[in-house]
Image: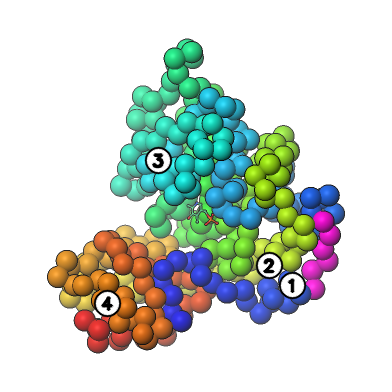
Amino acid sequence: MIDFRSDTVTRPTPSMQQAMATAPVGDDVYGDDPTVNELERWSAERHGFEAAIFCSSGTQANLLALMSHCERGDEYLCGQQAHNYKFEGGGAAVLGSIQPQPIDNEKDGSLSFDKLEAVIKPIDPHFARTTLLSLENTINGKVLPLSYLRQARQFTEQHGLKLHLDGARVYNAAVALNVDITEIAMHFDSMTICLSKGLGAPIGSLLLGSNELIAKARRWRKVLGGGMRQAGILAAAGKQALTENVTRLADDHANAHYLAEQLADIQGFTVKPELVQTNMVFARVDPTIDQNRLVSRLKEQDILLSAGNPMRLVTHLDITRKDIDTFLTAIKQAL
Ligand SMILES: *Cc1c(COP(=O)(O)O)cnc(C)c1O
C-alpha cells in the first residue's frame, strides 16, 4: 500500500518491534512499568519540562492539558482550525466544562494577538474566565516562526494566561526550522507530542508540563479511562520513535516538496510547491475531475488518497521517493 491519507498509517519499524518484544513491563497504573517511567522521565528532561505523562492518543493528551490547566467555567483561546477545537468532538466542553473561544487562524496558521486580546473576558460573573491560549505547530503542515512563539509567550505573560502547544507534529516544525526541539518547547507551559504520526510509533502521545500539571493530568487520565497497565510495550516503541525517527522527517519534507512540484505539472491539479513547509501537500482539484472515481481507480492499484478540495496528501516513514513516482505514473494513467 502507498497510503497518502495521513502520517498516522505508519507501521512499527523492525527496531520498534524488537524494542516492544523485549521491553520490561509492569502495571503502569501502580507506577510500576519501568519502560513507561523511563520514557516519561527521559522525555520530560529532553524537552525541558519537569514531568511527562504517556497517553493513549493525542486527543487524550490535549484534553488532559485543557482539563489540568482550566477549571469548570474557564475558557481557552484557540484557532478555528485548531485540532483541539474542531477535531476532538468538543471534548473540552463535553468532558471538562471548559468553553472554547476560537478565533480565525491567519493564513500562516498563527493567531493575531489583536484579535486574541479583543476576546479576553473581563473578570466579571457574566463571563467565563479566560485561562489559557492553545496554539498548534505545525498547523495544516505550516510552521509557526520562533519569533511568533516568543511574542505568544510575552502576550500570555502580559495577560496572565497559560500557554499550551498542541505539538502533535512539533518535530516536523523543529526539523523544518532546523532547530533543537527545546527552541520551540521553551515557550510553553505544556506541550503534547504525537508519537504515532510521522515519528512512526503504533500508539501513543506525550503531555509535558510542570510536576503540578502532570499530577493533575494523571488523575484525569484515570478518570477518563486512560490508565493503562503493561503500557511499556507501547512506550518502548515511543522511545524508538523519538530517538531514531526524528532526523529522517527531513526526507518526508523533501518528498512532499517533490510530490507538490510534480503534481503541479498535472493538468487539473493546482499546487504551490513553495507553500509546502513540512510533510503535507494541499492540491486544488479541478471540479471536472471525478475525485471519488479517481480515488477508487487508484485504490485498485494499492494507492490510497482522501478525496477533498483541497486534497491533502501526507508523506511519512512508509512512503519512499519511488512510491511517489509510482503514484505519479498511476494518477496520470487514471486521469
Ligand atoms: C492527530 C492530531 C491530534 C490527535 O491525535 P490522535 O492521536 O489522533 O488523537 C491532535 N492534534 C493535532 C494537530 C493532530 O494532528
Q: Residue at x 62, y 63 (%)?
A: 203
* Mark 3 and mark 4: Cα distance apart in space: 33 Å
Given the image, on which type of amino acid does mark 4 rest?
Leu
Q: Residue at x 68, y 73 (%)?
A: 16
Given the image, on which type of amino acid does mark 3 rest?
Gly
Queried whether the magenta region covers residue 25, the answer comes back as yes
* Badge 2 vs badge 1, beta-carbon distance below 8 Å: yes
Residue on which the image places disc 2: 237
* Mark 2 and mark 3: Cα distance apart in space: 32 Å
Residue 79 is marked as 3
Mark 3: few/some/many CA within 10 Å (<14, 14-19, 20+): many
Element under disc 2: helix
**Residue 115 appears in the picture as rendered:** yes
Task: Pinpoint residue 43: horizontal percent, then vertical percent.
Answer: 69, 53
Is the CB atom of the residue marked by disc 4 within 8 angstroms of ligand 1's nearest atom?
Answer: no
Q: Residue at x 79, y 50 (%)?
A: 29
Residue sitting at the far left: 288
Residue on which the image places disc 1: 19
* Mark 4 and mark 2: Cα distance apart in space: 36 Å
Query: Foreground: 114 or 134?
Result: 134
Magenta stretch in the rendered image: 22-27
* Mark 4 and mark 1: Cα distance apart in space: 40 Å
| Mark toward the start of the polypeptide (3 vs 4) | 3
Q: Quadrant of the C terminus?
A: bottom left
| Mark toward the start of the polypeptide (4 vs 2) | 2
Given the image, on which type of amino acid does mark 1 rest?
Ala
Task: Pinpoint residue 241: horizontal percent, then vertical percent.
Answer: 63, 66
